[in-house]
Amino acid sequence: MVVNAHNDSGAVDGHVGADRRYVVGVDYGTLSGRALVVRVADGAELGTAVHEYAHGVLDDVLPGGGALPPDWALQHPDDYREVLRHAVPAAVADAGIDPAQVIGIGIDFTACTVLPTMADGTPLCELDEFRARPHAYVKLWKHHAAQPQADRINALAHKRNEPWIARYGGRISSEWEYAKGLQLLEEDPEIYARTERWIEAADWITWQLCGVETRNACTAGYKGILQDGARPSAAFLTALAPGFGDFTAKLDLAPGVPGVSPLGGYAGPLTAQAAAWTGLPEGIAVCVGNVDAHVTAPAARAIEPGQMVAIMGTSTCHVMNGERLAEVPGMCGVVRGGIVSGLWGYEAGQSGVGDIFAWFTEQAMPAYVRAEAVTRGIPVHDVLAEQAAAHPVGAHGLIALDWHSGNRSVLVDHHLSGVIIGLTLSTKPHEIYRALLEATAFGTRVIIDAFEENGVPVTELVIAGGLMKNSFLMQLYADITRRPLSLIGSSQGPALGSAIHAAVAAGAYPDVPAAAQAMGKIERAVYTPDARRAAAYDALYAEYLRLHDYFGRGANEVLHRLHAIRLAARDENGAADE
């Protein structure tokens, strides 16, 4: 099909057939994959389907049995193929379109979610000899068992004055490729030796779609420590551990050749096998892979410098473009072209947000609150938010630290844990719930302050993800951050973002900004800060910062000591239930 010209808004001109072209975006989350069918001309979302991963998150035992240690989080790669086999055809059917009208497909993934494979892409966990070996499986983004390796990487990088460490806020996360790779080498050297590719799931599933191996600029930069065309040297890696000097060869397309592709680029044609899985036409464009958070910024039309996008779900990822390079302590990274070409893309994040709220309602909330929700026929979160909203700021007398899954930014320490102080015998469940919500908003303000203090202004906060449906939480974020909150105009931001990138890869738009202008959606300043509440929150935020620094910056290492005691007790007694 001929690619039509573009009008000033970036939308495809109304030539015959232009409004009947479609793209598919596939968003791979923590527990499921979602496919979305989108019209190329205007971004209209026509059909969607979700497929739950059969194996879910492997954090207790492997599929065939065998207990996993604490802080592990694995997945099975065939669950990702199953999304293509089930969610994509179902989404196309839901849209009611002719599959022949689909011109491209793109995917996004959680990150760093990484797996060991053979040179042809075969996952090691699918080889009979390695099915019982934990290190042969996908390591999910929230696999935090590589914290000791991350600590050593950081210490050695600073000792050697490695130039790249400042691009990552001074600390590499245990979630990333190098820490997980070093853990693999040290705990299962046989699996390490058999690993010919240490590949992000975003690149692996793209490879499954088009038969062409690629490396996307986003994960290569943020998770693979690729800066200015170079990775950490073999000398640095060997100094970390004998035998680790060849690690970058497992990351690159060829020795010394990262082979990184731009976001929105064309990865290759859909193979016959993938066409059979998805029901889409063989040969259509497959887009270069991307990360779920970063792909969302164009979907929200939030790619201008100063627009920080917070993708709020089980965790929160903060992404933002800037015109100049700045090194911000505690950020996850800054990568040229990491969000859109031509700008510096900044990333920060919080390891637990929605997960913390879910933990409270599932594990710590009294039964009578749930009973009220059932009686009234509304979600339990609505009951708690309604009760919490009836009281003024600070009336609960509580401060919490949102570290139940560790701290990604700005402390970059996954051995930290949650804290709540101020409890009394009269403290109510909704008061604890509110303190937890406030803690996550304070954590976001810490991140914003870190950027602004280092010359990266944040002028607007744009929210995407499932948590934007909680109006009490959104107003709370506006008040605490003292910024207007805009909302993405889609409940499926990552999938829409992947579809936007697929349209670019298929040639329907010249670049991602043009496609975003035509297909992206945003509602401006839906929530604005209330001056009185904002002032009251300033006082609570000051107390949050005191606790943050006291427990997180070395004044009191009690959380690290408790973590060590917990691990020792579990080692002594086996993998007992917590």
Image (cartoon, rainbow, N blue to C red):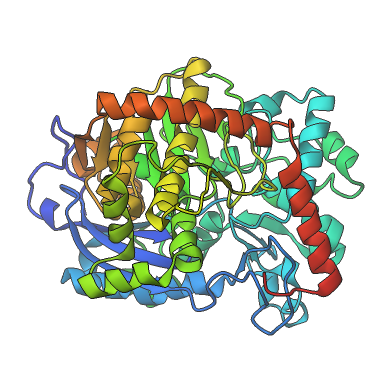
- What percent of the width, then of the height, locates residue 504? 32, 44
Tell me which residue sits at (31%, 38%) in the image. Answer: 392
Q: Is residue 512 above or below residue 32?
A: above
Tell me which residue sits at (23%, 68%) in the image. Answer: 100
Q: Quadrant of residue 225?
A: top right
Relative placement, left or right, of 575 versus 240 is left
Task: Report if residue 123 is visible in the image.
Answer: yes
In this view, the residue farthest toward the right is 242
Closer to the camera in the image, 466 or 324 = 466
Relative placement, left or right, of 153 versus 345 is right
Closer to the camera in the image, 514 or 398 = 398
Q: Which corner quadrant holds the N terminus?
A: bottom left
Task: Report if residue 266 is visible in the image.
Answer: no
Tell me which residue sits at (73%, 76%) in the image. Answer: 67
Closer to the camera in the image, 24 or 522 = 522
Relative placement, left or right, of 98 versus 464 is left
Q: Quadrant of residue 488?
A: top left
Tell me which residue sits at (39%, 40%) in the image. Answer: 310
Count of residue discs: 0
- What percent of the width, then of the height, locates residue 419? 59, 46
- What percent of the width, then of the height, locates residue 391? 30, 43
Q: Quadrant of residue 221?
A: top right
Q: Which corner quadrant holds the C terminus?
A: bottom right
Relative placement, left or right, of 166 versus 511 is right
Q: Is residue 103 above or below residue 444?
A: below
Q: Is residue 10 above or below residue 38?
A: above
Closer to the camera in the image, 442 or 544 = 544
- What percent of the width, then of the height, locates residue 234? 83, 38
